[in-house]
Image (cartoon, rainbow, N blue to C red):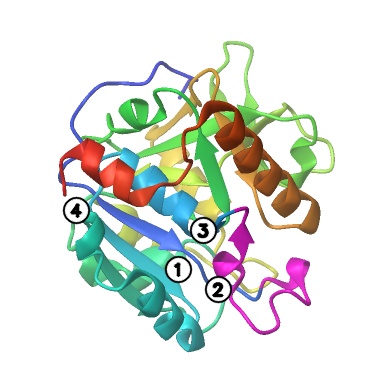
Amino acid sequence: MGIDELPRCNLSRMKGIILAGGLGTRLSPLTIATNKHLLPVFDKPMVYYPIATLMLAGIQDILIITNPEDLSRYEDLLASGDSIGVNFTYLPQVKPSGIPEAFIIAENFIAGGKCSLILGDNLFHGPGLGRALADFQEVKGVQAFGYEVKNPSDYGVAELDARGEVINISEKPGSPKSRIAVAGLYFFDEHVVKLAKGLVPSKRGELEITDLLMSYLATGDLHLSLLPRGTTWLDMGTFEKLQDAANYVRIIQERTGSIIGNLKEISAMQGWI
């Protein structure tokens, strides 16, 4: 499918998943004693930012998937979610086995419906982002998002044909066919669990998000939109990127007076509290 304009619809029935597991080896030794997604990014834990993105998209039922030993830490930090007008559920990922495993773990939580998945180390921020994301209740297939970067080999990359339509997605290609990275935020239809269960582990022994997206592409149900103009997308998985994200949050907050990732403010804005 092509890079299209964002459609419009209501997102009230969709559920959200935050994948916050893994070993965080790129951030060792910071992650030896704590989960990566609990590290501070300026004045908030990292996980606040993906939570904020889902909340801005109108999602109130949120599942956090993390390592078994970290479940209690998230429960201590976020509790039930009642104080911010959302419902948190917590489930373990016993072994990091790839992003699509999140849908298999979340099968009962999803309950045959549609869902959004965001990676726990991704920060999205920009004017009108929530309104744009709140348009994917009735997604058919998968809605993914592209973002032009100068170092596409570090990401999954969308390859386009002469008409600008997606014909392939490659994971960290040595010779990328475009500069459009696939961001760590997706909206999936009700078929995602079945498709995830049908994936074959890659050579590194994991289920790959690229393979899941390609399953949708094969049936013409992969939709890719560039993130809205003015949107910032930051992957916080390395020391440099973690520092960049902290600096970004600090600068924006100091210059504008607005707070990025303010969960109570977002909830009040949505009319949930």
- Amino acid type, label 1: Glu
Residue drawn at (57%, 75%) of the image: 96
Q: Secondary structure at mark 1?
A: helix
Q: Are marks 4 and 1 in contact (CB under 8 Å)?
A: no
Q: Is residue 168 visible?
A: no
How far from the left and from the top, in percent, is residue 253?
A: 56, 36
List the residue tagged with mark 4.
Answer: 113
- Amino acid type, label 2: Ser
Q: Is residue 13 left or right of residue 257?
A: left
* Residue 263 position (above or below residue 4): below
Residue 140, by quadrant, is top left
Q: Secondary structure at mark 3?
A: loop
Label whose residue precedes the other's in the sequence (1 or 3): 1
Q: Are marks 2 and 4 in contact (CB under 8 Å)?
A: no
Q: Is residue 214 visible?
A: yes
Query: Is residue 41 a member of the stretch shown in magenta?
Result: yes
Could you say which disc has been placed on residue 97 in the image? 2
**CA distance for labels 4 and 1:** 17 Å
Q: Are marks 1 and 2 in contact (CB under 8 Å)?
A: yes
**CA distance for labels 2 and 4:** 23 Å
List the residue tagged with mark 1.
Answer: 101
Q: Is residue 114 left or right of residue 161?
A: left
> In this picture, which residue range is highlighted in magenta?
24-42
- Amino acid type, label 3: Gly
- Amino acid type, label 4: Gly
Q: Depth check: 259 or 152 in front?
A: 259
List the residue tagged with mark 3.
Answer: 120
Q: Neighbour class for label 2 at 10 Å: few (<14), some, many (≥20)? A: some
